[in-house]
Amino acid sequence: MRTLANEDESNIATRMDRLPVTALHCLAVALCAFGLSFDTLEIALGSILAAVFSAPPHLAPARQLSVLLGAIYAGAVIGAPLMGWWADRHGRRRTLTVLLLWMGLTSLAAAAARDLPALSWMRALSGLALGAYPPVMIAYLTDLMPPLRRGLMIFVASAIATLGPPAAIFLVRWLTPMQPLGVEAWRWGFVCGGIGAGVVGVLTLALPESPRWLQLKGRAAEASAAFGSFDRSRTVLDVRVDPPHEPHRGGVDEPLEGSPASSRRSWPQVAALYFLSPWSTVAFPLLSGAVLAQKGFKLPDTLLYIGLSTFGPTIGTALAATAVDRVDRRVALMACAAAMLGCGAAFVATDSPLWLVAAATVFSLFLSLYIPVLSVYSAELFPTRVRASALAGAWALNRLGAALAPLFLLPLLRNAGASAMFAVIAVALLVGLLVVALAPKGRQRRSID
């Protein structure tokens, strides 16, 4: 046992903070990462559907295509706050299992959809889980990870999850000319995603519940048992652990960190960042297929270019994981937003395949960094008792923005062109930069409530 005899044995949170990174921590990260990879795979299937239904023989009216692309995010607006509330009351790990199993079921139903309206309904039902999984996962991992390596471990999970989109895109591209069993390739993408999500959902039953959450709920014996699982697990990364920082004690007009007043003050700013982010981070990848189709690229080439652009984030996120806990969260967010602004402008300004792939790859790289940094930054601001629901509520606004973005931007793209579409994305990034500058300071490398 690693804990010292003179430690406060009743304080599970303090004892969790003093642990090294163990094999059980790594298992939790791996399973959560694979679950998130199927979440991102489902999102990537939206880009595939945009390309498939923007070209013959499946050319769909702009209104129907907008509904199809926005349906998954409309479902997420409902699912995220509902399941975030559920996770704060009934447990993080149990909620993750339910979400993955629901994700698998609805993906298989989407594969069997007979027409575009039925597919849109299935995407909306999938959205109930896809909207909730990322914030609940972040809340769970934030509860578990040692402060000095919290960002590292969550970024590792995000890096693994970035393999989902290229897997989906290249699978569909490979199967497009073959159509096994006479079934269209995009349907096989849903089948594979559904089976994978279901398998990972079953495997998450092997993980312990959050000891912090169990102690908060007064389940001391279960909290101690869950902590013991981590305490007995083999050390993987043994790091110097500083004594947990005391929460900042605010002045007369400044609420204490972790207090209800502090959470209420921080949430609107966090929610604004989540709402603004899909106008760039979701809208650009989702509509990139339509942009390439508009530029005259054939479907196989479109899928190839989209697929190539998804490889950068895996390497970039893995490398950024080594530095994320040493950089102020707000500085990282502003740097990512500025880089996306430049890459997006380059993407819409060129017709060269080489520069299209380069711009989209670098944009995807910084996009893949922006979302994890925002997620970790937000999770650290809220106390354990409301962490999942606060994150999920903000994430619901993110999904609302993601639902509105295709409805507005796709007709704009078709009627006014890529430059007009990107002007809206640029405004969202600039407003986001201003909100980040005014947001609370991050809590990297510090204990959480």
Image (spheres, rainbow, N blue to C red):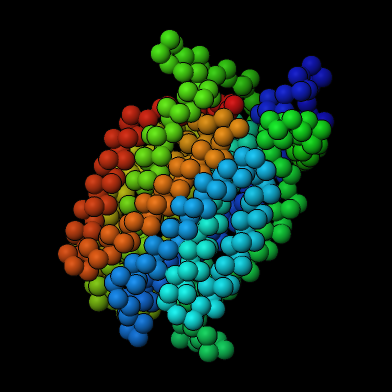
Q: Quadrant of residue 104?
A: bottom right
Question: Horizontally, is 434 left or right of 193 in the view?
Answer: left
Give residue 155's position: percent from left, percent from top.
53, 45
In the picture, the quarter occupied by the N terminus is top right
For the C terminus, which image quadrant?
A: top right
Along the horizontal axis of the image, is 331 left or right of 90? left
Q: Is residue 116 above or below residue 179?
A: above
Residue drawn at x 23%, y 59% as measured from the top left: 421
- Is residue 87 at all visible to an observer of this figure? yes
As rendered, which of 152 and 286 lies closer to the eye?
286
Q: For this rendering, which residue is in front, 399 or 27?
A: 399
The residue positioned 31% from the left and 49% from the top of the image is 340
As displayed, is residue 193 above or below residue 425? below
Q: Residue at x 45, y 48 (%)?
A: 396
Q: Position of residue 218 (x, y in %)?
A: 74, 30
- Residue pictured at 50% horizontal, 87% vertical: 178
Looking at this rendering, what residue extends furthest in the left direction?
Answer: 416
Residue 358 appears anywhere in the view: no
Residue 328 figure quarter: top left
In the displayed structure, does residue 237 sit left or right of residue 310? Answer: right
